Amino acid sequence: MTAPTAAPASREISGLTKVYGILADPIHHVKTPQMLNALVAREGRDGVMVPFHVSSEELPRLVDGLKAMKSLGGFVVTVPHKTAVVDLLDGVSDSARRIGACNVVRREEDGRLIGDMLDGKGFVGGLKAAGIDPKGRSVYLAGAGGAANAIAFAFVEAGVARLTIANRTRAKAEDLAARLADAVPGAPVEIGTADPSGHDIVANATSLGLKAGDALPLDASRLTADQIVAEVIMQPEETAILAAARAKGCRTHPGKPMLVCQLDLMADFLGMRSLGAAA
């Protein structure tokens, strides 16, 4: 008879444990709690991250309540709240203000909520870690929402030769292009269509692909085997656009590296490394 496998030891949660959250809707796909909790456990710190499933309509009420939660260290923000949360905070970094979106928020001792945006650094960092340097390359970016704004700024700062922004609502793409031009005079930015042909790197920064049956974020029939197709979505690991790109012979780059490259930045911003030791 095989001996039963011992259950893994559970972490002790006490009144001293610092609590962190992640705000999303839907929330089943998030990977940040697993990865940041593992980081905190490795360092022997007394903190835990849990999911906060909140709709767009209820977001202001939740954020207001979190200011009063003294045991809260902060929270991560993901789809679809990255843009809306900016105006609900007490302050954001200069880069988050320019981008118009925020994905990490720290609660100060006095209850103030201060935000920053790390998606762009994480996305470009993930590409570089995989040996894909955007410098001097032409890039097609699908989307003009919170993550797309951050990624667009990061691509321009990385020295791309051309950045084409395509979004279902053209006005949003034009607004992003205008802010890029204002922040970086001479930025090589243009507005595109659903056709990604003629670009070295094709990036999906929309939420299309989270759910089965979602429309594709771009015209996959125009992809060619010499292109690299990258994704921001982490779950499923292979989204419909990545599957379509792979079928075309493209090199594909999944969403997880964007988070992996942000983990240390998130942990530092949220103060996770300065927590007391776990009991």
Image (tube, rainbow, N blue to C red):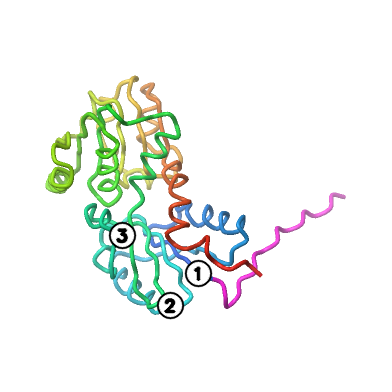
Mark 1, residue position? 19
Residue 79 screen position, x and y as percent: 34, 55
In the image, 206 versus 99, the foreground residue is 99
Cα distance between the residues tagged 3 and 2 = 20 Å
Q: Residue at x 27, y 53 (%)?
A: 95
Is the Cβ of the residue at disc 2 closer than 8 Å to that at disc 1?
yes
Q: Residue at x 60, y 57 (%)?
A: 43
Q: Which mark is residue 81?
A: 3
Asked if residue 5 is among those painted magenta in the image, a careful observer would answer yes
Asked if residue 44 is among those painted magenta in the image, a careful observer would answer no
Q: How many marks?
A: 3
Is the Cβ of the residue at disc 3 closer than 8 Å to that at disc 2?
no
Give the number of the mark in front: 3 or 1. Answer: 1
Tell me: 268 left or right of 57.
right
User: Hey, what amino acid is under mark 1?
Assistant: Val
Cα distance between the residues tagged 2 and 1 = 9 Å
Question: Mark 3 or mark 2: which comes first in sequence?
Answer: 2
Is 6 drawn above or below residue 248 in the view shown? below
Mark 1 closeness class: few <14, some 14–19, many ≥20 residues within 10 Å: some
User: Hey, what amino acid is under mark 2?
Assistant: Met
Span highlighted in magenta in the image: 1-17
Tell me: 219 left or right of 16.
left
Residue 89 screen position, x and y as percent: 29, 68
Q: Which mark is residue 69?
A: 2
